[in-house]
Amino acid sequence: MAGPKYPGFDTLALHAGQSPDSATGSRAVPIYQTTSYVFRDSEHAASLFNMERAGHVYSRISNPTVAVLEERLAALEGGVGAIAAASGQAALHLAIATLMDGGSHIVSSGSLYGGSHNLLAYTLKRFGIETTFVDPRDLGAWRAALRPNTRLLFGETLGNPGLDVLDIPAVAAIAHEAGVPLLVDSTFTTPYLMKPFELGADLLYHSATKFLGGHGTAIGGVLVDSGRFDWEKSGKFAQLTEPYAGFHGMDFEEESGTRAFLLRARREGLRDFGPCMAPMTAFQILQGVETLHLRMPRHVESTRKAAAFLAGHAMVEKVMYPELPEHPDYELCRRLLPRGAGAVFSFNLKGDRQAGRAFIEALRVFSHLANVGDAKSLVIHPATTTHYRMSDEDLKKAGITAGTVRLSIGLEDPQDLIDDLERALGAASRAGR
Amino acid sequence: MDFAVAGTKAFAYTAAHGLDPAKPTIVFVHGAGLDHSWFGLQSRYFGHHGRNVLAVDLPGHGRSEGPPPASVERMAQWVMQLLDAARLERAAVVGHSLGSLVALECAAQAPERIERIVLIGTAYPMKVSDVFLEAARRNEQSAFDMETIWGHAPQVPLGSNPNPGMCLYGDTLARLARLAPGVLYAGLKACNDYACGLESAAKVRCPTLFILGRRDQMTPPRAASALSQAIAGARTVLLQGSGHSIMAEQPDATLDALIEFFSGSSPP
């Protein structure tokens, strides 16, 4: 018998999670636009409700189209399974709400997407869940921030917008010493550029709105579990290891072992909070996933060209892209992201706010909007948009200044992008005189 | 539920029910390197339908402590000791892969206590390739890869899973990653060394069901024929698309076969 061989990434991106439709033979993933599923008989209904049989009951909990996306992402990430959610923020909230009660504590990187920072710093605080933000590069700070009630360490694989590379092996080791999991936001890297579970992370999520969908057409999130964290051994997660009155006294870890986290997240989180993904959204994101392995190399290649151009321009004070030697995470990036550091990066423009405004308004190919990871190139000014709720001190911690501009490099002709940047930099220069 | 077998902690999932000696009992025994939750849906069903269930973690697996028993015969003795600890006189035994040999051996060793047996994904002899055994002995990742890839039908990584959102390969690898070194090897070696299958089959007096997967790469259906022919009155259910991880790949068809088989014995 030949030695065992796993299907390659490209093959999984196209096939994992879907068999040709048994009813029609449809090769494309059918859009099961239905809320609910007819039971064979009363016994079948009762068995589905009591988790004695596999299958779908109600599309808030699971749906066949959405399940294809979930299984495909789990396969691409090397996880036990996944849950698709209404957005990346819904996926983050689902992870936290599954693991935490009031009185729990999170240690988080301070370099976060503004919405995530807001959730942790303000919104969850209202519900008794506190977060300590640390400099992601300061491993001592991660350790020092741990408390007896800490239940999670959290960071972005590439911090937004300064592109800090999270040292996942080191931070995971700190988390595991403390008996808690490490959750990472893997949106900027996608499984094509990085497999966080192979580096030690326990849970991850994506804003699938970005590179996974890849075309700026659908909002969604996906939460994936490695199944490697031993909740029983940790002893800190009664939510997963003690009988739960909200589901017939189920002890999720005893019931399902490696699947405990996802089981509770689906059976409680989707049931009670309801942040499910629509089947049409799952279909649209699947269309993107099927070409992820083709798009990401082009995104990265064009980003390298744009970053190199900006780094050599007189109007640019600093380019924050970890593939550039002057970035503080250059060596870490080479180690953890050998395929590339993604297609989102920031740079600091010389000059005042007028220069920044002139730059953005002079761009013709780049679109000025609040998104990243589109096939089209995008630009935004974080201090006045995505991160505007953050205090000056928090902005500084996240590496954002008044002149910081964030770019998301798309799939256009890279020379057209460079020409566009050059024209806009010229406009900024004239405005600043 | 925790028990003590020979002074060592032994765990069996009971579907969150207490054990009632008046009810019929089904013991579920998992395969090499796995644990009770591999029978999750099926054991939960019977636990909620009028039976005691004991979905065991063999010693050294899951929540059961102690070194893994060195032979199928010793594992069968451990199952009988567990029944003693649970104060249950009689039981049916459903086993998968290594567990199927344990079920067979239970029926041969204690025919007065074993009411029925179900052998899922079975073969006799259950030989394990040298390369697989050696990789497991060295606790190499390649052993986990072989268990994962050969342990499922070839189409599994490129198809859909009946359990929404779950990934069978990922789940198997995560389970194996939690094992203590040497546990997978002990299970595989016990399969490989088991040499009294036909003698034990000749001693079986209870109703017997084989559930086999047509696409099983580890224990293909033809490898079970010697055993099924040696057990008088044995029946076989062949699941067309399934590989070796039958309870996970085709959970409903497995459950349907079990319900039909047990419907002739006692409640439900």
Image (tube, coloured by chain):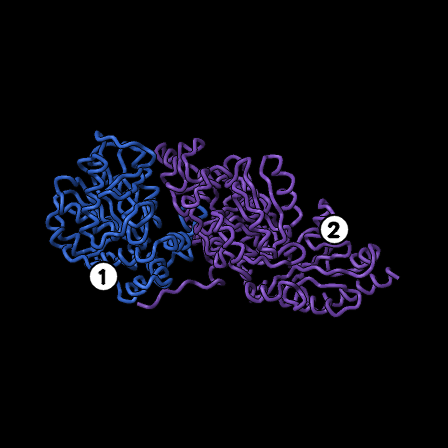
Chain colours: A purple, B blue
**Residue at (36%, 63%) from the top-left corner?**
B140
Q: Secondary structure at mark 1?
A: loop
Tag shown at residue B92: none
For marks 1 and 2, give the one nearer the viewer. Answer: 2
Left or right: residue B101 compared with residue A393: left
Q: Which residue is mark 2?
A: A383
Horizontal and vertical percent position of residue B11:
30, 42
Quadrant where the C terminus of chain B is found in the figure:
top left
Q: Chain of mark 1?
A: B
Task: Point out residue B180 in the picture as x, y percentages from the top left corner.
Answer: 34, 54
Q: Residue placed at 62% from the left, 66% from the top? A: A330
Quarter in which the N terminus of chain B is drawn: top left
- Label 2, secondary structure: give it: helix
Percent of width and height locating residue A303: 66, 65
Q: Position of residue B188 (x, y in %)?
A: 26, 58
Image side of residue B131 versus residue A46, left or right = left
On the question of residue A30 being in view, the answer is: no
Q: Chain of mark 2?
A: A
* Count of picture labels: 2
Residue A262 vertical position relative to residue B139 in the rendered view, above or below: above
Q: CA distance from mark 1 to mark 2?
A: 65 Å
Identify which amino acid the numbered label 2 is placed on: Ala
* Residue at the limit of the structure toward the right, as seen here: A433
Q: Nearer the viewer, residue B222 or A337?
A: A337
Amino acid on which the number 1 mark rests in the picture: Lys
Q: Residue at x 42, y 57 (%)?
A: B158
Query: Which residue is tagged 1?
Result: B127
Q: Say few, some or many: other residues with alpha carbon within 10 Å of mark 2 (under 14 / 14 to 19 / 20 or more).
A: many
Residues A175 and B227: in front is A175
- Residue A177 visible in the snapshot: yes
The residue that appears at 58% across and 47% down in the rendered structure is A145
Figure quadrant of residue A246: top left
